[in-house]
């Protein structure tokens, strides 16, 4: 009896791990936060300026984004702005990555303050 319970318990733990792992892997693109920081400074920076102070696109410093909640910023990044140079990023970035970028833009953590 004791042995049987132990065996069933061990199998239960294994099944649990097996079922959980794919859930964690799903939706992750494998990009690290440092990959995303480089993407924002280089790809977004090609239009918004390497220090996000503006160029072809408007500046993306926290003081420039005060009127936009993080969710509105995420929607702009996801869908782009029609009839402007701002492209939609949803084919390239996961929703989690877009949310992370929006929060960093609001907080100003990707560039040094000046
Ligand atoms: C090809 C040029 C280009 C690239 C690349 C680009 N943007 Fe833009 N973006 C624009 C332009 C132009 C606008 C202004 C659209 C308008 O007139 O409303 C804009 C607007 C925005 C806005 C709204 C700003 C505001 O104050 O209304 C956000 C936020 C934004 N971009 C974030 C990003 C992020 C994040 C990336 C990279 C993932 C990115 N953009 C890449 C051109 C670009």
Image: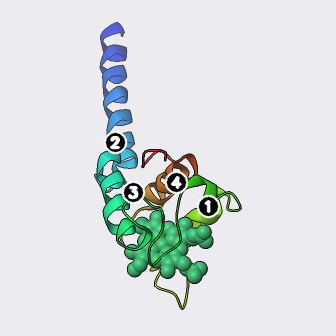
Residue drawn at the location 42% of the way across and 48% of the way down: 110
Marks 3 and 2, the one that precedes in the sequence: 2
> Under tag 3, what secondary structure?
loop
Image location (x, y in percent) of residue 96: 47, 55
| Nearer to the camera, 17 or 55 | 55
Disc 4 + disc 3, Cβ < 8 Å: no
Distance from Cα at disc 2 to Cα at disc 1: 40 Å
Disc 3 target residue: 27
Marks 3 and 1, the one that precedes in the sequence: 3
Disc 4 + disc 1, Cβ < 8 Å: no
Disc 2 + disc 4, Cβ < 8 Å: no
Image location (x, y in percent) of residue 32: 31, 47
Asked whether mark 1 lies closer than 8 Å to ligand 1, one says: yes
Distance from Cα at disc 4 to Cα at disc 1: 10 Å
- On residue 21, which mark appears? 2
Residue drawn at the location 56% of the way across and 46% of the way down: 107
> Under tag 1, what secondary structure?
helix
- On residue 64, which mark appears? 1
Marks 4 and 3, the one that precedes in the sequence: 3
The nearer-to-camera label among 2 and 1 is: 1
> Under tag 2, what secondary structure?
helix
Asked whether mark 4 lies closer than 8 Å to ligand 1, one says: yes
The nearer-to-camera label among 2 and 4 is: 4
Q: Is residue 61 above or below residue 14?
A: below
Q: Is the N terminus in the top left, top right, bottom left or bottom right quadrant? A: top left
Marks 2 and 4, the one that precedes in the sequence: 2
Residue drawn at the location 34% of the way across and 71% of the way down: 46
Disc 4 target residue: 105
Residue drawn at the location 48% of the way across and 51% of the way down: 100
């Amino acid at each position: 009896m004791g042995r049987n319970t132990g065996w069933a318990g061990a199998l239960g733990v294994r099944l649990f791990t097996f079922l959980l792992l794919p859930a964690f892997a799903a939706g992750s693109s494998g990009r690290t936060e440092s990959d995303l920081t480089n993407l924002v400074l280089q790809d977004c920076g090609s239009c918004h300026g390497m220090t996000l102070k503006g160029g072809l696109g408007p500046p993306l410093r926290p003081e420039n984004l005060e009127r936009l909640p993080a969710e509105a910023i995420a929607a702009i990044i996801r869908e782009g702005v029609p009839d402007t140079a701002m492209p939609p990023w949803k084919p390239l970035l996961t929703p989690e990555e877009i949310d992370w970028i929006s929060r960093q833009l609001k907080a100003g953590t990707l560039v040094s303050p000046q």
